[in-house]
Image (cartoon, rainbow, N blue to C red):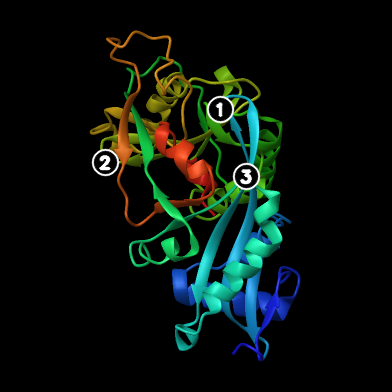
Amino acid sequence: MHTDITIVKNIRDDAALRSSFNRLAEKTFDLNFENWYQNGYWKENYIPYAAVREGQVIANVSVNPMTFSENGILHHYIQLGTVMTDSAFRGQGLCRLLMEAVEKDWADRAEAIYLFANDTVLDFYPRFGFQRVQESRFFAPLSACTTDRSAVLVPMADPENRAALERAILSGVPQGSFDMVGNPGLILFYASQFLTENVWYLPAQNAWVIAEAEGDTLLLDAIFAPCPVDPREAAALLAGPFCERFPQAARSLSRLECGFTPAGADGADARSAEDSSAWKVLPLENDDDALFIKGKLAKTFAQEKRRFPILSHA
């Protein structure tokens, strides 16, 4: 059935196939990976499995080997992403062909395989043995701004600033109880394109922070530092300069959301349950970015209050 199709597993440095891959990604997701590649951030741990016909990429499933630290213990997972099929070739089993190739190559090399799916394919991935799993969200009141105004916005349009962020990622320790280890290429996929004005340096904590405002919420996407940093303390240092830089946000910001699993959010927080600064944990309900897991991790993840870091989504 697929005799005219070749699965190509290394398209990164093939200009023609990379261009075809980008065209399909633009048509499917409005994404283009060329700048990411040209800036040197497309590393060896983003591996498209591309179905190629007559020199054109007509379907793809990308493999992302990921390392996470859970309370100091390292775990190795595979995240699948950029799952797409050209509209002219849908319904021909190409996704299954690619998924089977991925599983053959990677199933024994990781503890679990997972992916994030939008609301149009929620019934699709269970056919491949994936189970939908509930993530959690972590909120705390936004503390009163400190008098410290030393936080500095670091624009990512500057290559030197991006290089400094990359060094911070590589030298940082895991933050919180469940965090991605390393992987600067993935972080810079976001920071160099979509979050160019959202990266801050906090001298008081020698920490780099990526933050956004969403309505009344300061969303702390990530922290990179050589020592553990309490997101609530980082937010208190950031809030003043952030609101000065984005005055429209100053009128409404009242709470903090942590974009990864903060330490203590599982109930081990040393702060009293009556302490208003303790983390409030709510279910993450999002059919447009739903987590699916294949493997034993599905059961343990569902039992524990966790979320995959926002900037670990590939």
Identify which residue is drawn at 41% across, 34% down.
303
Give the residue at mark 1: 175
* Image location (x, y in percent) of residue 154: 56, 38
Camera sees residue 22: no
* Image location (x, y in percent) of residue 196: 52, 48
For the residue labelled by badge 1, is the local secondary structure a helix, a strand or a loop? loop
N-terminal of the two: label 2 or label 3? 3
Residue type at mark 2 is Gly
* Label 3 with label 1: CB-CB less than 8 Å: no
Give the distance between the C-alpha atoms of the residues marked 2 and 3, in whole angstroms.
Answer: 37 Å
N-terminal of the two: label 3 or label 1? 3
Residue 111 circle label: 3
Identify which residue is drawn at 62% across, 79% down.
51
Camera sees residue 185: yes
Q: In this view, does 244 lie above or below 274?
A: below
For the residue labelled by badge 3, is the local secondary structure a helix, a strand or a loop? loop
Q: In front: mark 3 or mark 1? A: 3
* Image location (x, y in percent) of residue 271: 38, 9
In the rendered image, the residue lying farthest to the right is: 13
Q: In this view, does 246 lie above or below 141?
A: below
Q: Residues within 10 Å of mark 1 (few under 14, many from 20)?
A: many
Between residue 201 and residue 184, name the one nearer to us: 184
Give the distance between the C-alpha atoms of the residues marked 2 and 1, in whole angstroms.
Answer: 25 Å
